[in-house]
Image (cartoon, grey):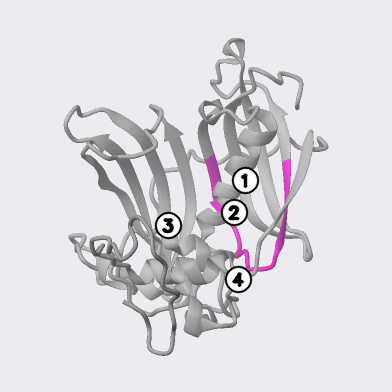
Amino acid sequence: MTEPGVSVGVSVGVGVGFEFPPRKVSWLKRDTLLFNLSIGCKADEPQFVYLNTQEVIDFHATQGAVRIPGVPDLDPARLVDGDRTIQILKPLPVTSQGRDFEFRSRVLGVYDKGKGGATVLDLEDVLVDAASGDVYARNIGCLFYVGQGGWGGPRRGPARARKFPPPEGKAPDLVFELQVDEQAAHLYRLNGDYNPLHATPEYGDMMGYGGIIMHGVYAYNRIAHEIVRELGAGDPASLREMSARFAGPVKPGDRVRVELWKTAGGGVDAEDGWMDVRWAATVDATGRACLTGGRAVVRAPKLPSKI
């Protein structure tokens, strides 16, 4: 079959005129967005890089799908990350094909920071192979629902243990910088976090951020990768634990400065090559903190003197 106006030369020989069987084709809106970003479409071209609905996840709908007893409805449009600790317990397979993985989540606490303040939700998520019961990873963190306080819930919970300040008065042992691409928020959301806060400016304007901001875990994961690359010789098994508090937004186009300190103790198996590393990140242009109280438990079997 040819398009109107397109002429095709006629040849004579073996196989001429053979037609291959038709092949079905399909695509998702996600595929369209990913292709457009891959060929260089820009963040200021929403007609190419942002669709308000996704067949994969409707972010706002999923956040309110399950009610927590005793907690009022919270507006998912005002949701941001507070802090996060990830513990890697077993190496993750490259694909889940042929396996049945699931997240099992439980509430550790819900706290009301008062009228005009936030509601803070502490959670634990574990990644489990449902068939074997093996736990591959644990995520302990909190979510902030900005401006959603004042409903009469408990103001404070037990003292938080996830605080990892850098050593006082000690210069960092290693510094690196990461450039955030202008299209990074639109590209990163295609990993499955479709919060429109990271794709269209009205939500960030409503929350006082001045437009689109990056996913909190974007810089967190970029830093984790750089720690593995710089300190773990690129070995994915070199990172055992990662923690940080999300102290301020990172925006597309920002350059992030990361400072790291090697510390002693912290329950880390130093004799096995594991290091307790503290870190903090700032937006380079302003010096404003974006990730604080950072900690990484990392092993550098090939480069023991890197830091």
**Are the residues at dot 1 and dot 4 in contact (C-beta closer than 8 Å)?**
no
The alpha-carbon separation of the residues under discs 4 and 2 comes to 22 Å
- Vertical order, 30 against 155 (above or below): below
Q: Which residue is mark 2?
A: 219
- Image mark for residue 40: 4
Foreground tag (2 vs 3): 3
Q: Quadrant of residue 284?
A: bottom right
- Vertical order, 165 against 26 (above or below): above
Element under disc 1 = helix
Which amino acid is tagged 3?
A: Asn
Which amino acid is tagged 4?
A: Gly
Q: Residue furthest top?
A: 271
Which amino acid is tagged 2?
A: Ala
Q: Earlier in the sequence, mark 1 or mark 4?
A: 4
Q: Which residue is mark 1?
A: 223
Q: Earlier in the sequence, mark 2 or mark 3?
A: 3
Q: Earlier in the sequence, mark 3 or mark 1?
A: 3
Element under disc 2 = helix
Foreground tag (3 vs 1): 3
